Structure formats: structure tokens, C-alpha cells
């Protein structure tokens, strides 16, 4: 996956979504985190915070990953190995 631009979300930028706005790049998201760190009174360039913008962007990608997934495909999954279990 290209770090500069996340994978597109269904309906996020296609022509069928009325009023859709362009999705910020990964670099823009990381810059926004730097701005928030400065707003909070910290220095985003100090050693302990240098990788924080990347970590935050990666965390948000993980948090919102489900928006790009088909819920029906996930819910159709079943577990075949149920021998010996009679309860949940």
C-alpha cells in the first residue's frame, strides 16, 4: 500500500456520491497531527514525538478499515471446527 495515499473507500470519491470531497493524503493527515501537537503546546519535532504523526495516521487507518470492507463477506464466515463444543 502506498503510504502517501490510503486505499479508496467505497463511495468516498466516486462520481456517484453527491457532494463528495477529496480525501486528504497520508502526508496531509500526518501534518494535521503535527498541527494538533503544536496546538496542545508540544513540539512535534522533539525526539519522543517524531514518529507520532505516522503512528496516529496508521491507527486511524486501522480504526476505520471496516468502512472499506463488505460486511456481508465478513458475516458469512463460519467456523467449521466445532467438535467438542456444545455451547458458545
Image (cartoon, rainbow, N blue to C red):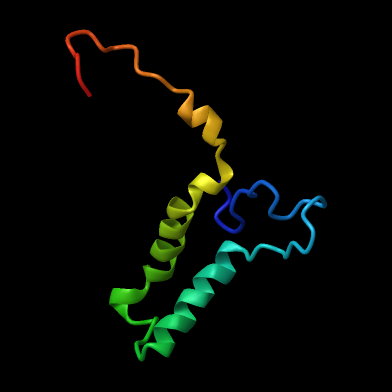
Which residue lies at the image location 74% right of the left edge and 61% below the top edge? Answer: 20
Q: Determine the residue located farthest toward the right in the rendered image.
A: 15
Image position of 76 with respect to 82: above or below: below
Residue 20 placement, left or right of 41: right
- Pick out the residue farthest to the left: 84
* Residue situated furthest bottom in the rendering: 41
Q: Residue at x 50, y 45 (%)?
A: 66
Is the residue 2 above or below the residue 84 in the image?
below
Residue 3 spot, x, y in % from top left = 55, 55
Kindly indicate the quadrant of the structure image that contains residue 43.
bottom left
Q: Is residue 59 left or right of residue 87?
A: right
Query: As rendered, which of 43 and 81 lies closer to the eye?
Result: 81
Q: Residue 70 location, x and y as percent?
A: 57, 36
Q: Quadrant of residue 85?
A: top left
In the image, is residue 13 above or below residue 80?
below
Q: Give the side of residue 84 with respect to residue 69, left or right.
A: left
- Residue drawn at x 44%, y 51% is 62
Is residue 71 rendered to the left or right of residue 16?
left
Q: Is residue 34 above or below residue 29?
A: below
State the count of labels: 0
Q: Position of residue 76 (x, y in %)?
A: 48, 23
* Residue positioned 81% across, 50% down in the render: 16
Q: Quadrant of the C terminus?
A: top left
The one nearer the camera, 87 or 10, is 87
Task: State the residue in front, 87 or 72.
Answer: 87
Residue that sits furthest to the front in the current view: 87
Where residue 58 sits in the image (x, y, percent)?
A: 44, 57
Amino acid at each position: 500500500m502506498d503510504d502517501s495515499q490510503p486505499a479508496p473507500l467505497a463511495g468516498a470519491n466516486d462520481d456517484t456520491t453527491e457532494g463528495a470531497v477529496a480525501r486528504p493524503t497520508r502526508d496531509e493527515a500526518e501534518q494535521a497531527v503535527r498541527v494538533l501537537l503544536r496546538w496542545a503546546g508540544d513540539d512535534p519535532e522533539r525526539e519522543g514525538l517524531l514518529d507520532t504523526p505516522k503512528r496516529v495516521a496508521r491507527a486511524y487507518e486501522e480504526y476505520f478499515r471496516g468502512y472499506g470492507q463488505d460486511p456481508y463477506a465478513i458475516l458469512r464466515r463460519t467456523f467449521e471446527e466445532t467438535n467438542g463444543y456444545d455451547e458458545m
